[in-house]
Image (cartoon, rainbow, N blue to C red):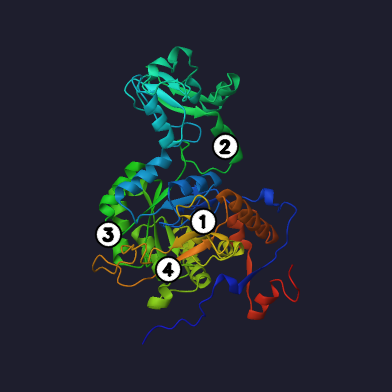
Amino acid sequence: MAYHYEDVSRTFSEYLLIPNLTRKDCLPSNVSLVTPLTKFKKGQKPALHLNIPLASAIMQSVSNDVLATALAKCGGISFIFCAQSIESEAEMVRKLKKTKAGFVVSATNVTPETTLGEVIALRDKVGYSTMPVTEDGSATSKLLGIVTSRDYRESRDPLDKKVKDFMTPFSRLIVGQEGVSLKEANDIIWEHKLNTLPIIDNKQNLLYLVFRKDYEEHKKNPDELLDSQKRFVVGAGVNTRDYAERVPALVEAGADILCVDSSDGYSEWQKQTIEYVKKQYGDKVKIGGGNVVDREGFLFLVDAGADFVKVGIGGGSICITREQKGIGRGQASAVIDVVKARDEYYKKTGIYVPICSDGGIVHDNHIAMALAMGADFVMMGRYFARFDESPTKKLKINNNFVKEYWGEGSERARNWERYDSGEGKKLTFEEGVDSFVPYAGKLKDNVVVSLAKIKSTMCSCGANTIAEFHRNARITLISATSITEGGAHDVILK
């Protein structure tokens, strides 16, 4: 006879938070949303953390290098989708890691023999007009000069004109030496009214470029999520099929953390994948596991070596796994159960394993509810798919702007590895749909509003940190009529 869970499977919408005493220091400006990304021992700090508790889903229609950059600037993390070739996923990671906050490895370089026509073509291709002139055209050889849009007149200069005839030569450049700090580099830029400062070593080899605009950008984004080398932090998805080839390529490309992309993480295939990573790289490479919905699944992945555990099956807006297979659990019930197991595990072992709530987020207050229930961060797809930075098309339908958004289990995605049952290389039936979501503009503009709501909720619950929110939050189950009462009612809306 099947085991029967007595508790009803519940969603975030079925709960409300009861206000606690709001202390005088409980101000939104005092709230810290810093949260652990990887497991750590009691009394120690995690190897990786987030500055805001938001992650974008491992989905074709959500997480590419463009969105990953935008989210990292805000303090969150993206996991680049793995339903693509190993080479293209690694290249997305590599693109993002080339960008150092302040120090940038030059991606567009020319030689003295390059023609103006080639410079223009390169500019149009990559969108950059500043190009270092190096001895062999690489990003790390001897710096001979620099070319900017001020060095030529496209309408008058012949296209076969050589770079050496119009570049600004090295003798006229102001440069920084290897070891200069970002602050010192920016001081040089401001003192000499520069837009770009090349950084070289003692042999005149180019190392980095520092741009004035990046200094201003950093000031606008104080919560940027950066690694020890001041590069943006990025995650990458892996599957349980080609992990032996994909993982090394992603590690070499510079991925900060990996995550197994699977609809059901309570499987021997997932355990095998995580154990492979830990055997090959030890604790140097971090990897999250999931998805699971109960204590047994959580403990299984933790025992395999998972650095964080993703919770949720069938709760995504484009997911139809519950309809098709009849498996899953209400997201709130899943989070509550897994968090309880996590806290017991922490008490027993002294090791804290972060929980990622994945799915079931419809409103911003659901993010706060997931955190209150004990999740350390949330992963979202639909939320991020709405923005300019997501990789899908913006369309106009019935006088409204929308963006395309499809599930990894849809016929369009055909991500059979994510739903692999161990046999064959095909998607026998769909577990996701192809859809549209309302277009919402820029990522940062929306994230700022969402975070303001979360901080305000935390203040009302007497918490200035997510850990304090975990301890202090009081939650009540609500009725259907209580849900109706909580919205606008008995009025005629304008």
Q: Is residue 262 left or right of residue 366?
A: left
Mark 3 to mark 4 CA distance (whole Å)? 23 Å
Res. 96 visible in picture:
yes
Residue at numbered disc 1: 384
In this rendering, the label closer to the viewer, 1 or 3: 1
Residue neighbourhood size for the residue with mark 2, other residues' Cα within 10 Å, grouped as few (<14), some (14–19), many (≥20): some
- Quarter of the image for the N terminus: give it: bottom left
Residue at numbered disc 4: 433
Q: Are marks 2 and 1 in contact (CB under 8 Å)?
A: no
Q: Nearer the viewer, residue 87 or 225?
A: 87
Mark 3 to mark 2 CA distance (whole Å)? 40 Å
Instruction: Classify mark 2: helix, strand or loop.
Output: helix
Marked residue nearer the N-terminal end (4 or 2):
2
* Residue shown at the point (59%, 63%) measured from the top left: 372
The amino acid sitting under disc 3 is: Arg
Marked residue nearer the N-terminal end (1 or 3):
3
Residue at numbered disc 2: 217
Is residue 432 placed above or below 102 in the rendered structure? below
Q: Position of residue 345 (x, y in %)?
A: 45, 63
Please give the label number shown on residue 241. 3
The amino acid sitting under disc 2 is: Glu
Instruction: Classify mark 4: helix, strand or loop.
Output: loop
